[in-house]
Image (cartoon, rainbow, N blue to C red):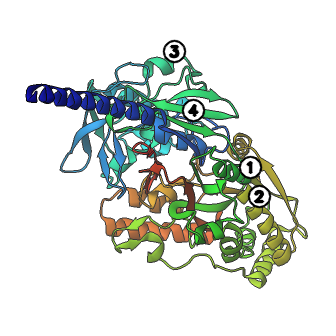
Amino acid sequence: MKKVMKQLLLVSIVLCFIFTSACSEQQKANADKNQVLTIIRNVTSEPANMDPTFSDDSAAFEVFRSIMEGLVALDEKAQPQPAIAKEWTVSEDGLVYTFKLRPTKWSNGDPLTAHDFEFAWKRMLDSKNKGRAEYAYQLFYLKNGEKYQQGKAKAEEVGVKATSDDTLVVNLEQPVPYFLSLTSTPAYFPLNKKVVESDPNWAKNADTYVSNGPFKIKTWIHDQKIELVKNENYWDKGKVRLKQINLPFVNSAQTAYQMFLSNQADYIAGNSIPADLTPQLLKEGKAKSIPDTTPYFFIFNMKKKPLNNEKIRRAFSLAIDRKAIVEKVAQGGQKVATGLVPWGIPDPAANKDFTDAHPAYVPETAKAEEAKRLLEEGMKEEGITELPEITFDYNTGELHKKIAETVQQMWKKNLGVDVQLRNSELKVFLDRIDKGDFVIARMGIGADYLDPMSFLDLYLTGGDSNSSYWSNTEYDSLIAKAKSTADQKVRMETLHQAEALLMKEMPIAPIYYYSSITMKKDKVKNVKHNPDGTTFKYAYIEE
């Protein structure tokens, strides 16, 4: 009898174990099915260009964070960590980097090799792409990189060489303290040579797009949405828990907020949260404010008279009440901009933020009397008694619209100038900027790497990203000096001088430093807010 009881007990235990295991597997399967995240963040409209060589808009860069990866990736402390490169060595003089790549594949199954990096970097620098590849200047650190773009050197003379499928050797013009961080940016992403050369439209549709990040594009319905799914060929796929990320294009903050409330969106951020609701949402703890290394500023087109006059540019800048914009319009924990370089960018020589290591270049509140005086003096110098029509351009977005309307009123009140507003969808807006078809326009540029140079070398004479068309030989010399040394004390002193000069001549008018306002469902876990942007690689849905 005891033997029978023991056997029955054993059978019960086994059945219980089998049942529990089955339940556990079923729960896991159900959980996996639920690993779908819907995000409304910076992809509020159709990305202008999804080819990393030619892309320069925030919508595309936001998608890149999930689908593309460079040699390294930055962690939450902005330190370079192995990504496609599993390890690297640096020569004693800081001029030669040797990267060893890990075995990995493209999303279409093709092997990803060092040759893909060499191809992509040289494509970015190719003189045939000058003017289209706006971030090519970031590869001028490579030996003969700038000369190759100018047609003064051959491709084989550029300082990047795949010596084998898994080895990439990089030679620099001079030591660059932040070079490893640079290799995490889109300008340094690899490209599948076979795909790019066989199909010039490869980056325009989901079925032809090839990437190498934790996710890949599954669906792309133009002007509506992009859907990403886990990339089964990603080298670190074991740490990726989300099965799918949905990116609907929603350019209305009210619509995005209502989608969040009705559980149609799990995570919203940035301009996707109504500005008038932001203070209360922050107060109630329903939203969170995260400092963002992005300045919000205006650019003046110096090819458009009378904006070529420094006094007139300064007048328009001094007529702006930045404090009022931050506190009464944006209302999301932003900080009044004291210069172009934003908060969160270190000055290692001063051991503090770069912004805290220099005096304020622009006032927080409007200086109406000084602005009027400068405007009158500038108009007299230009020989005009009235201004031509001034138009302010901004891309679609409720906060952009409110700021534009607020500044329009400030210019009317403090300068007596009527400014017309012009709104465009992102693609059209960026096309206008590229063609110089604007007088004054809004702009925002995030940090590609955590160094002041990420912002200050944008305004070199003739630079593809120098949308103001400003030119100053002294400024160019200062940037060149900062790039020629690894001595941080010399670099920082020189970069402060450069920013002071930029702010004196005012081809741009800083307004504030961004703060990313986010809202997420409690079930959304492990979203990483790194200094260079938000990543969803490790995120998951907790059920």
Of labels 3 and 2, earlier in sequence is 3
Question: Do the residues under discs 4 and 3 have CB atoms within 8 angstroms?
Answer: no
Give the x, y percent position of residue 368: 77, 81
Mark number displayed over residue 227: 4
Q: Residue at x 12, y 30 (%)?
A: 6
Q: Secondary structure at mark 3?
A: helix
| Res. 269 visible in picture | yes
* Mark nearer the N terminus (1 vs 2): 1
In what quadrant of the picture does the N terminus appear? top left
Distance (Cα) linking label 3 and label 2: 42 Å
**Residue at 59% from the left image edge and 36% from the top image edge:** 132
Task: Determine the residue positioned at 45% across, 58% down.
Answer: 453
Q: Which residue is mark 1?
A: 396
- Type of amino acid under label 2: Lys
User: How far apart are the alpha carbons under marks 4 and 3?
Assistant: 25 Å
Which residue is label 2 attached to? 401
Residue 335: horizontal and vertical position, in percent?
A: 57, 71
- What element does badge 4 sit on? strand
Q: Earlier in the sequence, mark 4 or mark 2?
A: 4
